[in-house]
């Protein structure tokens, strides 16, 4: 399964970025092969609006079936949900730890956004 994790830097030792739409990076991980790839999200870091929607579209283009992030706003959540991408909240730790928690079934799937729009 291909998952996308919000990250503060380019590698799996980075912290999970607490923001979805304005995350610095998305790290995609194949849970079967263990392969990971970093994707810059610079275009949305300082977006006046629409960062969550655009980031959700990016994640969908990357082929992710699930997202792990610290928080997800309502527009991002709706866009991910429409693309049939599951959202898992991981409030802290490294990307590597988040991947392991996901593989171990320790992360609960979110059923709604957990922050208001334009959360920083």
Image (cartoon, rainbow, N blue to C red):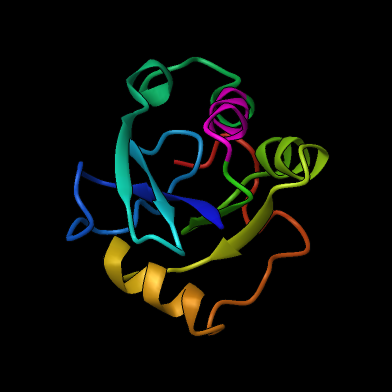
Where is residue 83 shown, x and y percent of the image? 76, 37
The magenta stretch is 54-63
Where is residue 94 shown, x and y percent of the image? 26, 66
The residue shown at (40%, 53%) is 29
Inspect this view and state whether residue 24 appears.
no
The residue shown at (39%, 69%) is 98
Q: Most prominent secondary structure in the magenta stretch?
A: helix
Inspect this view and state whether residue 99 appears.
yes
Vertical order, 95 against 24 (above or below): below
Vertical order, 81 against 107 (above or below): above
Where is residue 114 shown, x and y percent of the image? 65, 59
Q: Is residue 22 magenta?
A: no
- Looking at this view, is 82 or 34 the one in front? 34
Q: How many marks?
A: 0
- Residue 115 left/right relative to 32: right
Dividing the image into 4 quarters, which one contains the C terminus?
top left
- Residue 110 left/right relative to 55: right
Where is residue 84 shown, x and y percent of the image? 78, 46
Image quadrant assignment for residue 89 = bottom right
Dividing the image into 4 quarters, which one contains the N terminus?
bottom right
Vertical order, 114 against 63 (above or below): below
- Looking at this view, is 29 or 113 the one in front? 29
The residue shown at (70%, 54%) is 113
The residue shown at (70%, 41%) is 80
Residue closest to the far front: 33
């Amino acid at each position: 399964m291909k998952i996308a994790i919000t990250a503060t830097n380019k590698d799996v030792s980075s912290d999970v970025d607490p923001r979805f739409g304005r995350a610095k990076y998305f790290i995609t991980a194949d849970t079967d092969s263990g392969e990971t790839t970093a994707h810059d999200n610079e275009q949305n870091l300082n977006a006046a609006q629409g960062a969550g929607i655009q980031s959700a579209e990016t994640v969908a283009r990357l082929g992710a079936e699930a997202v792990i992030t610290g928080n997800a706003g309502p527009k991002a959540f709706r866009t991910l949900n429409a693309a049939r991408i599951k959202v898992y909240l991981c409030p802290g730790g490294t990307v590597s730890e988040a991947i392991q928690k996901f593989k171990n079934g320790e992360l609960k799937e979110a059923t709604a956004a957990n922050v208001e729009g334009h959360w920083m």
